[in-house]
Image (spheres, rainbow, N blue to C red):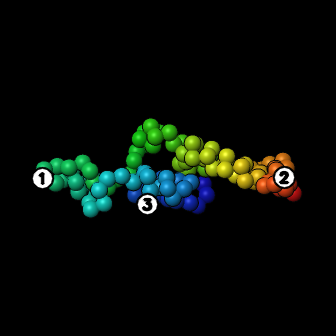
Amino acid sequence: MSAPLNGCRECACDFTSLRLFDAHRVGVNAYTYSESVAMEPMREDGRRCLGADEMLERGWARNDKGRWFDPEESERARARFCAAGVAPEGTREPQEGPAGVGLSRP
């Protein structure tokens, strides 16, 4: 496995984006989940990581490197790159850029 991109020290999960890393941490920042359930009265809103089942419920998936990613976010990024005339990684297809300028990759 390669070095983590956006690795979490708490749960050891890795994420393809900082936005997704931030989104996997939920709850109140003032205390941890363990501290919150020990409070009197008990609270369950302490800071914690989402579990794998919760991330799957949000539509996230793991890529071939084991990193969590959001397929919808990936598709939006792919569409933006294509609209900008940038060939997707691993292809050699010429792309049309702004005003018909060719942006083919060698």
- The x, y position of residue 12, in whole percent, is 46, 55
- The x, y position of residue 28, in whole percent, is 29, 56
**Which residue is located at x 43 percent, y 60 percent?**
9
**Which residue is located at x 75 percent, y 54 percent?**
86
Discs 3, 1 touching: Cβ within 8 Å: no
Name the residue that disc number 1 marks.
40
Looking at this view, name the residue that lies furthest to the front: 99
Please indicate whether residue 91 sits to the left or right of residue 40 in the image.
right
Tell me the SS state at disc 1: loop
Name the residue that disc number 2 marks.
100
Going by the numbered disc 3, the residue's amino acid type is Arg
Say the numbered circle drawn on residue 9: 3
Please indicate whether residue 37 sits to the left or right of residue 78 in the image.
left
Camera-near label (2 vs 1) is 2
Residues at marks 3 and 2, CA–CA distance in whole angstroms: 47 Å
**Which residue is located at x 26 percent, y 50 percent?**
45
Looking at this view, name the residue that lies furthest to the left: 40
Q: Is residue 71 above or below residue 87?
A: above
Q: Quadrant of the C terminus?
A: bottom right
